[in-house]
Image (tube, coloured by chain):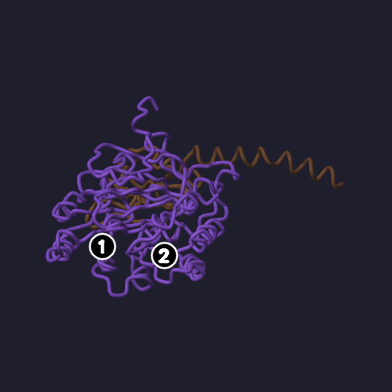
Chain colours: A brown, B purple
Amino acid sequence: MRRSVFIAGLAAVPLVLGMGVFGTGRKGSITSAQEKMSTMEVKIDNFSFGPVTLKVPVGTTVTWTNRDDIPHTIVSTDDPKAFKSKVLDTDEKFSSTFSKPGTYPYFCSIHPKMTGKVIVQ
Amino acid sequence: MSDKKKDELLHDHNNDGVNRRGFLKCMAWAGTGAFCVMQGGVLKSYSLSRLLELNTTEANGELSFVQISDSHMGFNKPANPDVAGTLKAAVDKINGLTAVPEFMLHTGDISHLSKPEEFDTVDQILKSAKPKDVFYVPGEHDVLNDDGKQFLERYGKGSKGSGWYSFDKKGTHFIGLVNVMNLKAGGLGTLGHEQLEWMEDDVKHLKHSTPIVVFAHIPLWSVYPEWGWGTDDSAQALAYLKKFGSVTVLNGHIHQTMQKVEGNVTFHTACSTAFPQPQPGKADSPGPMKVPAEQLRSVLGITDVNYVQGQHALAVVDSSLA
């Protein structure tokens, strides 16, 4: 009995993973009841934002993930600031939804040489 | 590196360094701190691992103090899972000095994430050090989320602005500067107009023969701007110090020892008590460098500085914790 549960569990893993990939691959399909939404990711590695410039459609939620061993922030350079994260330690995330078209430059306020921008079209 | 001259070590015990231009740097991973001795108006700095080689004449001056830096309390990644242990090791070395230093300077990044318990831990560990006075300047890790409010409450009593101040000890004028606030996108460390004006006024009435020691977190000279290792408006600050015969600048931030002698000014960065960082441009980023556990303590340390009147030279040597 125990064995069969185990096998079933194993079989379920790729299924769940597959759904996960499918779900994010077809952005917005799950939340079709609401207005079309999508998410995009920016990874922080080696003191840099990747991609440095991210182009997204209006309504996109951008999520930054800090994958460095050192904390970083995501702070808009506009005045007033369009967005500002708290300090992100390793593997912590910050999200911001972009509802208006435009160019949104930002930087890490701890390591100001780290800059990036989100272009919303 | 092909340029061997650039990696030359400066172990200058002969007080002949002041007219030597160029980039002399100690790239050996040695010393989280410095033992500093003021002798005759000139500051000398020794790595703790070399203290046994010092004779009493060298170790004794009008004034001696210790510089430690970048404790990053709260950091727990593989580069050093025990930053409290390595800070304690630094304190043990300080307590092992035959002449008890007058005080300690901490050149910032006391904490890793500006958390109260991180500051508490450092305060607790430093209480066991024989020198009782500690003078701090903030690193960027100490002013996260609250624009430095907590730092000022804890360490900034009697300071101006975001935490700058000066004091005198046995004829030497010390200036603690803050260059980690209001950083601008794409830029380096910043002192800002208000602080520069204060500094100009602070040194205006001092005699030219007064030895000056400036300490701040981010280097006040251009170590490697590509990684943000420099301060945008430091030239203005240094211009106010041109009239003085003996100027020493002590910084942290880059987690390695480097030195530069330029005219009357000697620049020196201290190692971290927590983890080493790569040499400029020698890695993809300035992130923590992982070294084998048995080597870690050899790349961490404290810096001692010793000051001698009447000679215009500075020697800085860092000692490792090993």
SS at badge 2: loop
Against B176, residue B221 (above or below) is above
Between B289 and B202, the one nearer to me in the picture: B202
Between B72 and B263, the one nearer to me in the picture: B263
- Does residue B277 appear left or right of residue B291 in this picture? left
Q: Position of residue B186 (x, y in %)?
A: 26, 44
Residue at the farthest right position: A1
Amino acid type for the residue under numbered disc 2: Pro
Report which residue position mark 1 lands on: B175
Taking the spot 80% from the left edge, 45% from the top edge, the residue there is: A5
SS at badge 1: strand
Taking the spot 26% from the left edge, 36% from the top edge, the residue there is: B22
- Determine the chain carrying the residue at label 1: B
Q: Which circle, 1 or 2, is nearer the viewer?
A: 2
Q: Can residue A92 be seen in this view?
A: no
Q: Quadrant of residue B309?
A: bottom left
Taking the spot 39% from the left edge, 41% from the top edge, the residue there is: B26
Q: Can residue B227 be seen in this view?
A: yes
Gap in angstroms between the C-alphas marked 1 and 2: 18 Å
Q: Where is residue B241 in the image (x, y as percent from the top left)?
A: 17, 55
- Determine the chain carrying the residue at label 2: B
Q: Do labels 1 and 2 share a chain?
A: yes
Amino acid type for the residue under numbered disc 1: Ile
Q: Does label 1 or label 2 sit earlier along the sequence?
A: 2
Against B28, residue B38 (above or below) is below
Q: Where is residue A57 in the image (x, y as percent from the top left)?
A: 34, 41
Between B291 and B247, the one nearer to me in the picture: B247
Mark 2 surroundings within 10 Å by alpha-carbon count, few (fewer than 14), some (14 through 19), many (20 or more): many
- Does residue B53 appear left or right of residue A119 in this picture? right
Report which residue position mark 2 lands on: B101
Q: Position of residue B270 (x, y in %)?
A: 39, 51
Between A31 and A107, the one nearer to me in the picture: A107
